[in-house]
Amino acid sequence: MRLGIRPITYNTMTKKPKTESYVRFDWAMKRLLRNKANYGVLEGFLSTLFDQKVRINRILESESNRESEYEKSNRVDLLAEMEGGQLVIIEVQNNTELTYFQRMIFGTSKLLSEYINRGDNYEKVRKVYSVNIVYFPLGMGKDYLYHGKTEFKGQHLGDILDLSPFQKQRFKVDSVSQLFPEYYILKVNEFNKVAKSPLEEWIHYLNTGEVRDDASAPGLDLVREKLRLEKMSKSELDAYYKHLDDLNILRDNITTERAEGRLEGIAEGRLKGIAEGREEGLAKGLEEGRAEGRAEGRAEGRKEGLEEGRLEGRAEGRAEGREEGRAEAIADMVRKMEAQGLDGSIIRQIIGLSGKD
């Protein structure tokens, strides 16, 4: 049975629907909704979320919904069994948790193992729904409702693996995904608009603890009836207000931790930036110094080489000039002696002596 959407009406005087405050849903899960007389509130919420009629058979006790002292304000969960045997674990988480996705996986896996006995046929594996109401920024996404299920997609053809006709008849489901756990994440803090559908009316209540007088979503009428503050005893009110105080302290701690984390991050970033700047500056300075040194060295080398070349050239030129001058002087002497009629033996002796010189 699918649920219809009823349009919202407004007060003709103010043009705005009235709102009234009620007990927060997480505290009600701890103290009120485990009572069979109040199952209707949960049934209305789940019927609206699943978009089909839901009946709760009983509230179960599980290792997963036993709270520690630390978790009394931070988180609360409730395990319900529906009439068809399906299990629904509803969890409210107030504080940021980095590994929340992994805990969702662990919670459903543990639940599956708790409710099947060793040696049982696998047909007895229960269908599990994990409903997570979170009051912190979980992951990256702008929507306030996410639904996850398991499908097997062909890597080459892109088709979705389906059940055989016999499996559909035997397991009484239409698809493989209906056999696997399903996950719902309600990021209620992301909802900041006027509620226009039954689900949005529920999200508004989960976010603010308020129910408008024109809200018509299944279960919200029972919220008005059973979760009024004036219906609680003094001891219940004291406990409830302490719960609200604890939540405020928790939020203050989160805000403080985030602020301190930002300041520490900025300080560490500056120090790291200074260190990296020094290192980069030193490396650049060394490289520039080497380049300048090579350029200056080449210039000085050219200058020194030119000077040395000039000096060596002059010395070699003088030596060569002297040698050529001697040879020309000897030749001139020989010519003069021959012109004077001297014989060849004297000339040879003169040449021999000049060779020894």
Image: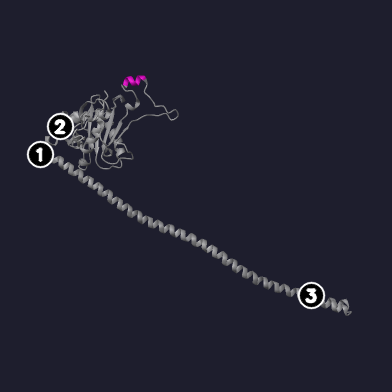
- Residue that carries the numbered disc 1 in the rendered image: 234
Check residue 281 for magenta coloring: no
Q: Who comes first in sequence, dot 3 or dot 2?
A: 2
Total numbered circles: 3
The disc at residue 226 is: 2
Label 2 Cα neighbours within 10 Å, binned few <14 / some 14-19 / many ≥20:
many
Q: Position of residue 174 (x, y in %)?
A: 33, 23
In this view of the protein, which residue sits in the foreground, 188 or 194? 194
Rounded to the nearest angstrom, the CA distance separating label 3 from label 1 is: 138 Å
Label 3 Cα neighbours within 10 Å, binned few <14 / some 14-19 / many ≥20:
few
Front: mark 3 or 2: 2
- Residue that carries the numbered disc 3 in the rendered image: 328
Magenta-highlighted residues: 165-170
Secondary element under disc 3, as helix, strand or loop, is helix
Q: Who comes first in sequence, dot 1 or dot 2?
A: 2
Secondary element under disc 1, as helix, strand or loop, is helix
Q: Who comes first in sequence, dot 3 or dot 1?
A: 1
